[in-house]
């Protein structure tokens, strides 16, 4: 199966230079008043208590403050489950994926006994990254790189390129040359550090500080909603990597609200899924769910095309989905960093990887049932869908980049929200709950669904 990768895709708009003239990091004085972490938290708590009809945007400092970002790292990211991979990226024992999350260099590996582990890539000898970028990014085990999949490879052992120490796939130190004169050196004590991980519906998550409550219990309702997609049987077919000069919340908000179809996607998504018809389900502790119904006329057109044996969605319709599920796109934010778009023909999986208040990496990954890749027209479908995906992502990259610049401008004003931006408000309520060390909808009555 051919996997298209777009590791070199960089949004033309995503030029740091356009941002830095506004950024306080460059030495140019920001128009923003500086707020302490406590001030930002207090304001988030205040606005999260407003009903949606009175809702306002977050203070811009929530998107620009390094101190607030540092608080998020410890109190939102490191103590929760973060998405790293899909099992189809590491299908066989010895397959691995290297990925950095929050600056933490990690390997996701399927061990000899088929067990999935998340290991640190930091060598216990002198702190070398055992798969450093400068040495090429993929395939640094003692084995082969998997062509086309960034960071993926197959290995029998991992070897640190600095002094050639070797490690088993479970992280144990196997070889450490010329250490026989080092006193009290016990090989068993010097493996790669292992992080807590869990597999949910085929997705591998990591918990960096080891304290997160069980993930599966929190996502029961979501597992049921997504069961028809059979996520654990899907295969990754397109991966794009984006360097994003904006805060992770700018992207989460943008992804989850469809009010912007009217503007940013006026020619692409709005004619298919008009903003006005989109709606949110009730508040949940662990995720946000939005519905994007397809226009009635489009549903009728699609049904006739399907009856003629065509593929109006781009890829073939997923057979296990009911007709009802195929009448819309289903958007999900699994707090804090996983986004999904579950569509009639695919699932798009987004890994947000925050790097600072105004910087993140985004991996956008398309998954389809294995059967889809066996279609005789698969190569042509893959090519055209890759282009389409890139085009509508570029629209969002432009918007998000411009929004982040706006936070630093002296013309910046706090805004008011439309009822179509319920997801933005739910994200605020999530942040407010995290400032209190809890999850949303667990201490207050959950916000009700907006089902039309
Ligand atoms: S730092 Fe890895 S072997 Fe020395
Ligand atoms: Fe968008």
Image (cartoon, rainbow, N blue to C red):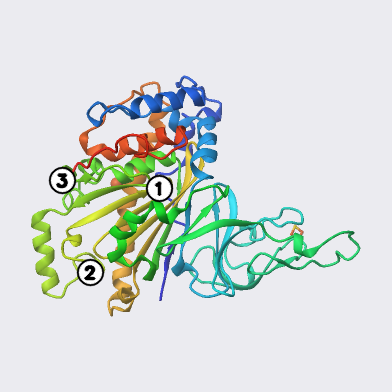
Assign the C terminus to one quadrant of the image.
top left
- Mark 1: few/some/many CA within 10 Å (<14, 14-19, 20+): few
Q: In the drawing, what numbered circle is on residue 221?
A: none
Residue 346 in view in this figure: no
**Residue 277 — which label?**
3
Vertical placement of residue 436 versus 391, above or below: above
Circle 3: is it few (<14), some (14-19), or many (20+) Cα within 10 Å? some
Q: Can residue 239 be seen by looking at this rendering?
A: yes
- Image height check: is 440 above or below 25? below
Please give the label number shown on residue 12: 1
Label number found at residue 317? 2
Tag 1, which secondary structure?
loop
Of the residues under marks 2 and 3, which one precedes in the sequence?
Answer: 3
User: Would you place residue 237 above or below residue 57 in this image?
Assistant: below
Q: Earlier in the sequence, mark 3 or mark 1?
A: 1
Give the image location of residue 309, x and y in percent.
Answer: 15, 75
* In the displayed structure image, the side of residue 266 where residue 393 appears, left or right: right
Residue at (51, 38) in percent of width and height: 75
> Picture quarter containing residue 62?
top left
Q: Going 38% across and 47% down the picture, which residue do you hit?
A: 286
Circle nearer the N terminus (1, 2): 1
Q: Pick whichever, 287 or 35, lies toward us.
A: 287
Viewer-nearest of labels 3 and 1?
3
Which SS class for mark 2? Answer: loop
Tell me where residue 74 sits by quadrant.
Answer: top right
Residue 406, how many percent across, how many down?
A: 38, 30
């Amino acid at each position: 199966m051919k996997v298209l990768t777009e590791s070199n895709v960089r949004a033309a708009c995503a030029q740091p230079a356009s941002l830095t003239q506004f950024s306080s990091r460059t030495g140019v004085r920001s128009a923003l008043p500086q707020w302490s972490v406590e001030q930002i938290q207090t304001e988030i708590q205040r606005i999260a208590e407003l009903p949606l009809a009175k809702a306002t945007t977050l203070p811009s400092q929530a998107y620009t403050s390094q101190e607030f970002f540092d608080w998020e790292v410890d109190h939102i990211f490191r103590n929760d489950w973060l998405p790293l991979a899909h099992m189809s990226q590491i299908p066989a024992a010895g397959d691995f994926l290297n990925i950095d999350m929050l600056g933490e260099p990690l390997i996701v590996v399927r061990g000899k006994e088929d067990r999935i582990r998340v290991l640190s890539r930091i060598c216990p000898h002198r702190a070398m990254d055992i798969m450093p970028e400068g040495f090429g990014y993929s395939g640094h085990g003692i084995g082969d790189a998997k062509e086309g999949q960034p960071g993926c490879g197959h290995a029998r052992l991992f070897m640190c390129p600095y002094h050639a120490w070797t490690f088993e796939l479970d992280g144990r130190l196997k070889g450490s040359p010329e250490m026989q004169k080092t006193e009290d050196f016990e090989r068993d004590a010097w493996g790669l550090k292992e992080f807590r991980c869990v597999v949910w519906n085929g997705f591998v998550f990591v918990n960096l500080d080891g304290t997160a409550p069980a993930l599966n219990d929190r996502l029961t309702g979501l597992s049921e909603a997504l069961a028809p997609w059979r996520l654990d049987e899907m295969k990754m077919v397109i991966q794009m990597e984006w360097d994003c000069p904006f805060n992770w919340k700018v992207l989460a908000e943008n992804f989850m609200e469809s009010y912007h179809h009217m503007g940013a996607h006026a020619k692409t998504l709005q004619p298919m899924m008009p903003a006005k018809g989109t709606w949110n389900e009730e508040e949940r502790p662990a995720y946000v769910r939005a519905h994007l119904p397809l226009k009635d006329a489009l549903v009728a057109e699609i049904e006739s095309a399907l009856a003629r044996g065509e593929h109006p969605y781009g890829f073939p319709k997923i057979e296990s989905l009911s007709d009802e599920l195929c009448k819309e796109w289903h958007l999900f934010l699994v707090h804090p960093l996983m986004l999904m778009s579950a569509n009639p023909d695919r699932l798009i999986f987004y890994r947000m990887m925050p790097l600072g208040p105004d910087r993140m990496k985004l991996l956008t990954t398309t998954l389809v049932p294995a059967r889809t890749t066996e279609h005789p027209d698969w190569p042509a479908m893959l090519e055209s869908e890759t282009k389409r995906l890139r085009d509508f992502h570029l629209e969002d990259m432009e918007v998000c980049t411009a929004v982040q610049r706006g936070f630093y401008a002296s013309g910046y004003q706090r805004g008011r929200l439309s009822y179509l931006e319920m997801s933005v408000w739910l994200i605020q309520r999530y942040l407010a709950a995290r400032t209190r060390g809890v999850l949303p909808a667990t201490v207050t009555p959950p916000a009700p669904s907006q089902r039309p």
